Image: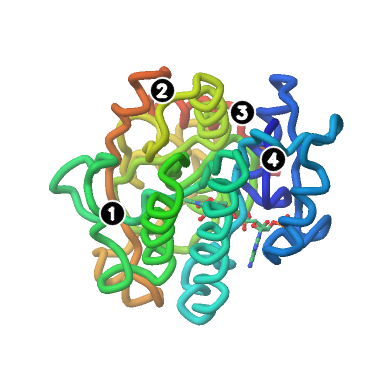
Amino acid sequence: MYIVLGKSGYIAKAIISELKKRNLHYLALSRSDIDYTNFKEFQNFYHINYNSPSTPTKNSKIINCAGYVGKPNVDACESNKGDTIMGNVVFPTNLANHCSTNSSTLVQISSGCIYDGYDKDFSEEDPPNFTFNNGSFYSGTKALCERMILKHNPRSYIFRLRIPFDHINHQRNYLTKLMNYDTLVNVTNSLSHRGDFAKYIIDLLEQNVPFGIYNLTNKGSVSTEEVVDLIKETILPNKVFNFFNSLDSFHKEVKAPRSNCILDTSKAEKYINIRSVREALEDSLSHFSIF
Ligand SMILES: NC(=O)c1ccc[n+]([C@@H]2O[C@H](COP(=O)([O-])OP(=O)(O)OC[C@H]3O[C@@H](n4cnc5c(N)ncnc54)[C@H](OP(=O)(O)O)[C@@H]3O)[C@@H](O)[C@H]2O)c1
């Protein structure tokens, strides 16, 4: 049994759709169903449903897609630090404790934005280098969340997502963002196809792979200019894209610094096949509808 928290969210929707596709038994919860962020309320709900044939919460895998990501972007986390800490650190830590005492498994959605720089492709073993002191407040909370979860419940999964995209026009889709921003910054990054990310998570969970952290981006990396070229080749041949002259001029426009990095996916690739970022981008753009 899977329990998905944060059901109205962008990533939760892809995971729910993957669970549905496979006919796996799941229960998806939104704060509008029960306020699972109120820990007493969540525990009451959990115990009422423990062993119930329709919603057996015993031995469940709780996929926590809930979090405070800042809208319209992570700059909002700089001015809402309390909500960011509560949503991204306190709540998942409580959940980790809950899972360790209730025979359930925590599956936490994390982020690759805890790394910055191109000295190497970052593996799960590398300590975060883009957190509270030099990164954004959001990235700081995501790094702290990983540490707290593994400290409180090492029998958990942490799956790292990075810059999601797919074929569906949506304000959270990286491709939609590139098509709509006035000016772009040319940087190289790993990216995660949203549906692939959901599929890979369920593949790994169904195989009961060892607990721990997994980088789950598509294979390889791509620069903004390369993605723009693909967009022009496929759907917007006449659109003019403008770029900042430098990363510094971009950083003057935003409140929080942004991370740029490449993640090493070889740990997950021991268990699953991961398609390349280029293939996933071409696939998404070939089905993309801008209307
Ligand atoms: N999107 C990205 O670019 C990205 C990249 C890397 C990692 N992630 C991680 O992926 C996870 C899901 O992100 P997402 O992009 O799906 O975000 P999202 O669309 O904002 O969804 C998050 C969901 O969390 C729930 N929630 C619980 N407490 C909340 C609070 N205080 N404020 C706002 N929402 C709250 C809400 O669902 P209900 O109201 O239905 O309960 C909300 O829809 C997060 O852990 C995020 O850090 C996202």
- The answer to whether 276 is drawn above or below residue 217 in the figure is above
Q: Are marks 2 and 3 in contact (CB under 8 Å)?
A: no
Q: Is mark 3 within 8 Å of ligand 1?
A: no
Which residue position holds label 1? 115
Could you tell me how many numbered marks the image carries?
Answer: 4
Which residue position holds label 4? 3
Per the model, the C-alpha gap separating discs 2 and 3 is 20 Å
Q: In x, y percent, where is residue 200?
A: 50, 27
Circle nearer the viewer, 2 or 3? 2
Per the model, the C-alpha gap separating discs 1 and 4 is 29 Å
Q: Amino acid at mark 3?
A: His
| Left or right of residue 42: residue 184 | left
- The answer to whether 179 is drawn above or below residue 125 in the figure is below
Circle nearer the viewer, 3 or 1? 1
Q: Between disc 1 and disc 4, whose residue precedes?
A: 4
Q: Between disc 3 and disc 1, whose residue precedes?
A: 1
Which residue position holds label 2? 274
Q: Between disc 2 and disc 3, whose residue precedes?
A: 2
Which residue position holds label 3? 287
